[in-house]
Amino acid sequence: MQHHLIAGEEAGRPVESLSVHDPATGEVVEEAVSGDAEDVEAAVAAASRAASDRRWAEDGRLRSRVLYRWAERIEAESEALALLLTRENGKLLSESKVELAAAVDTVRFAAGQSRMLEGRSLTLGPGVYGQVIFEPVGVVAVIVPWNWPVLLALRELAPVLAAGNAAVVKPALEAPLTLMRVLGLALEDPDLPAGVINGVVGSGSVVGEGLVSHPDVPVISFTGSVESGKKILRSSAEHVKKVVLELGGKSPSLVFEDADLDRALPVLSKFTYGTAGQNCMAATRILVQDGIFEEVRERLAGIAQGLKVGPGTDPDSEMGPVISQRQLDSIHAAVEEGVASGGELTVGGERLEGGSLEAGCFYAPTILSDLPRQSPAVQKEIFGPVLSLERFHDEDEACESANGTPYGLVASLWTENHNRAERVARRIEAGTVWINTYLRMFPEAESGGMKESGLGRSRGRAGIEEYMEIKHILSEVGEG
């Protein structure tokens, strides 16, 4: 049974447990202890004690060593961790391996940054000197989703630690196991003070809200849905907490008539149906210039129909299951709503059953074409293997359509015209824009959302500074 990790040890009373299921087979992967308010209190208390340890907060070399060694242990265990992740999450084993490798890279980048947190000095007038310094905020709650649980947790947790803070991590109920194993690897380090990293598994209504409302947790980092993010914002107002949010996306990809379709379409299909579309950065909207629309629709339909859907552990599978029956029902309802709004069901739109798929939550790769811009299937995040294929006439219409949703997380554009690419990239309202590529993320470069896709930034130097306070110290030097 998976227990909590509090003050450097396994903890949690087995009063209530939850079963983590394999979405490909329905089988129970493992049981986990489900946390309550007492567990939250214990974890926050442990983190608060650790945050007050000036040795951790002030010694960047110590933090760097601990983070580098943690990355090495994750890398050494990555094969076993990837298999566990696929079993609890359903994604392809190849995707799980990519996630673990990216997580290792993220921790290593943060390890280097631990020693580079310099401030600056100012001469403000005759005999007046200022220092601008960065200090840890203290305790950070890191609340993460189930789709890419390890990477999305460490993307925030690694900079939290690099900045000298302590943390309480709340994994998602659907897939907590791999992340808790990864956190446990960090606790093996003899130089990590007890309580710097804590993990509590439990529901959002108990553990999540307990962390958000706790007066001793000044910063909340949340990755998840827009609705949950708004709720966290409202709850955090009581104590004027800082909130870092990466929320949903309805990411547009603009394909112009001069685009290299042989390059663009396989890439876009991969990131439409990767993780069965359960990715806030998935290529969920493809906007195509009208002169090539029919060709693109035909070719994308062929790719979607040719995908082999199956368990993530099957090396021949090209798309795995969705996380649960509840999610499958939600996806199908969104597809039906899209068709009812005036869209055309080009391919898919059904649950896949029979053979190795019978016991799992498998949904067909789906394309909806020519949806009205105000269709719910265009305006809302579906979080499944569903593509909205839309058309535009010129550059102005492309930008208007791309920006015509409440989201602004990521986007891509495909054209051989460099001038157009630069113009359009600046007009698109998204935190990240890729030109002739997709989902290329690096720890060095900041990412995050505009509009309802979030607040603050992850990765890069700004991703660390989100978890630091800026202090100005002024000295006025007299003659005596």
Image (tube, helix red, strand yellow):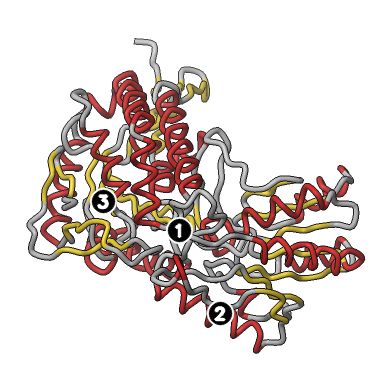
User: In the shown orientation, is residue 239 left or right of residue 422?
Assistant: left
- Looking at the image, is mark 2 or mark 3 nearer the viewer? 2
State the residue position of label 2. Answer: 334
- Looking at the image, is mark 2 or mark 1 nearer the viewer? 1
C-alpha span from label 1 to label 3: 40 Å
Which residue corresponds to the image point at 23% horizontal and 37% vertical from the top-left? 196
**Which quadrant would residue 118 be assigned to in this image?**
top left
Residue 316 image offset from top left, x and y in percent: 54, 51
Mark 3, other Cα within 10 Å: few <14 / some 14–19 / many ≥20: many
Q: Is residue 16 above or below residue 93?
A: below
C-alpha span from label 2 to label 3: 37 Å
Q: Is residue 87 above or below residue 155?
A: below
State the residue position of label 3. Answer: 217
User: In the shown orientation, is residue 238 left or right of residue 127?
Assistant: left
Residue at the outermost top position: 480
C-alpha span from label 2 to label 1: 24 Å
